Amino acid sequence: MTVATEIDRDEALDIPTLMRGIGEAAKAAAAELSYASGATRDAALLAAAEALEDTVPAILDANAADMEFGRAKGLSAAMMDRLMLDAGRVGAIAGGLREVAAQPDPLGRVLAEWDQPNGLHFRKVATPLGVIGVIYESRPNVTADAGGLCLKSGNAAILRGGSESFHSSGAIHAALVAGLRAAGLPETAIQRVPTRDRAAVGEMLAMPGLIDVIVPRGGKGLVGRVQSDARVPVFAHLEGICHIYADAAADPEKARAVIVNAKTRRTGICGAAECLLFHRDFLAAHGAGVIGDLLDAGVEVRGDAGVQALDARVVAAGPEDWGREYLDMIVAAKVVADVDEAIAHIRTYGSSHTEAVLTEDDAVAERFFGRLDSAILLRNASTQFADGGEFGFGAEIGIATGKMHARGPVGAEQLTSFKYLVEGNGTLRP
C-alpha cells in the first residue's frame, strides 16, 4: 500500500477498508524497522528535519487554512495559539527532530543480564512495541513529535490528528515521509489518517491485531472515549490539572515569578498551572503581590473568600472551579492551612499530571514529594517544564498520567518493550 494522500470527499470513504489497509501497511513497516540500524533511523530523522525547513512556506500556507477553520469554529485564543505555526515554531519542530536523532539508540539496550547455576545466560534487551496509534487534537507539532519518536524507537506510527490541524499535520507529515524516503525506509512507517471522519478513530481503537498501543493526546472527552472503547493497551494522557502550592516557607520573589510563568507563558499547554494553593501565612504576607501580578497580566483569578479579600478584581470560585483544566487565562486559587491540606486537595481534584511546591523548607518538600503520586513533581520551578524536550528527551509523544509502563513525558525510551535472550551450551532441563 502506498502512503495515503488527503481525501477530501469523506462521504465516499470506506473507512474500515481504509484503516485496515493503513494498519496492515504499518505492521509490515514495523517488521522492517525492528531490524533497521539506529544510524538509518537517525538519518531519516535528520532528513525529515531538513525537509521541514525546506518547505516552511508550504507548511505556513497549510497552517493559514487551519487557522481560518479554527476562527470559523470559534476556537479560544489559547486554542488558536496551540494551532498557530510560524517560521520560528517550524524551526523548533525541526530542531526537536534533530534532538531526537542525537539521543542514544533506545533499541538493543541490555536492561539486565545474569547467569543461572545451570549454565544458562540471560539478557533482557529493549525492543520496539510495534505499531503505535496516536490520536491527538489541535497541536500540529505533535505530528512531528509522535512520528519522530516512534521512528527513533523502531515503531511504525499511525497518526490521527484533530480536524483543526488537518492541513498543517498533512504538510508536516509530508516532510516525515521525505525523511523516510531519503533513508531508504518504508514510507508507510509513519502514516497519517487522511480524513477528518471520526469513524477512523473508532476503527483505530478496534484493531488489536494491527495496532499494539494507542496514545491519546487531548482533552478529557477524547481520552475518556479512548480508554472506554480501546481494545488495545492505552498510554493515557489525561487532563493537565496542574497545581502549585506556595508554602509558608516559600521565597516570595521566586514564588511570584514561578506562578506567573506557570500560568501565563503558554496557557493552552497541559503543563500550565490551573490551581494555586496558598499557605495562609504566605497569603497574608505576600498574597496581594502574587494575585496582583496575575490580574495585571490579564489572568482571571477565581478565588475562595481568603483570596477574594486580597483584591476586588478576584472572582468568586464555585465548586466547578476545583479540578478544572481551563487552558486559558483563568486560574483557581484557594487558602490552605498547611502542606497536608494542599496534598489532600490535590489528591481530590488533581489528574496525576504535574504539581509544584514552592518552599525553602526541605521537610515540606520531602512531604509533598513523598505523599503525592503525580507523574511529575517539581520544587521551586514552573509547571511549564512538564515537557519531554525540557527533560532532555528531544520531544515527547505525550505526558502519561497512568501508572503502567510509561509515566510522565513519553520519549523514545518509553516507547520500547523488551525480550529475553537466553543462551546455553546443550543445556537440558532435568
Image (spheres, rainbow, N blue to C red):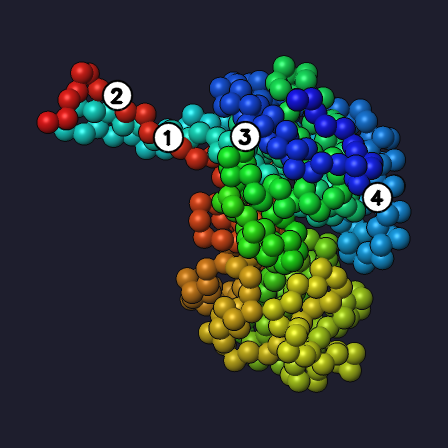
Residue at 75%, 79% (x, y): give it.
315
- What's under tag 1, amino acid-wise? Lys
**Secondary structure at numbered mark 4:** helix
Q: Earlier in the sequence, mark 2 or mark 3?
A: 3
Residue 238 position by quadrant: bottom right
- What's under tag 2, amino acid-wise? Glu
Foreground residue among 376 and 150: 150
Q: Which residue is mark 1?
A: 419
**Secondary structure at numbered mark 3:** loop
Q: CA gap, disc 1 to disc 2?
A: 13 Å
Residue 184 lies, in percent from the top left, at 63, 14
- What's under tag 4, amino acid-wise? Asp
**Secondary structure at numbered mark 1:** strand
Foreground residue among 94 and 407: 407
- What's under tag 3, amino acid-wise? Asn
Q: Are marks 1 and 2 in contact (CB under 8 Å)?
A: no
Q: CA gap, disc 2 to disc 3?
A: 27 Å
**Crowd rating for badge 1 (residues with CA inside 10 Å; few <14, some 14–19, many 20+):** some
**Crowd rating for badge 2 (residues with CA inside 10 Å; few <14, some 14–19, many 20+):** few
Q: Which residue is mark 4?
A: 66
Q: CA gap, disc 4 to disc 3?
A: 29 Å
Q: CA gap, disc 1 to disc 4?
A: 43 Å
Q: Which residue is mark 3?
A: 155
Q: Earlier in the sequence, mark 4 or mark 2?
A: 4
Q: CA gap, disc 4 to disc 2?
A: 55 Å
Residue 186 position by quadrant: top right
Residue at 55%, 78% (x, y): give it.
336
Residue 80 lies, in percent from the top left, at 81, 52
Residue at 79%, 39% (x, y): give it.
10
Q: Which residue is mark 2?
A: 423
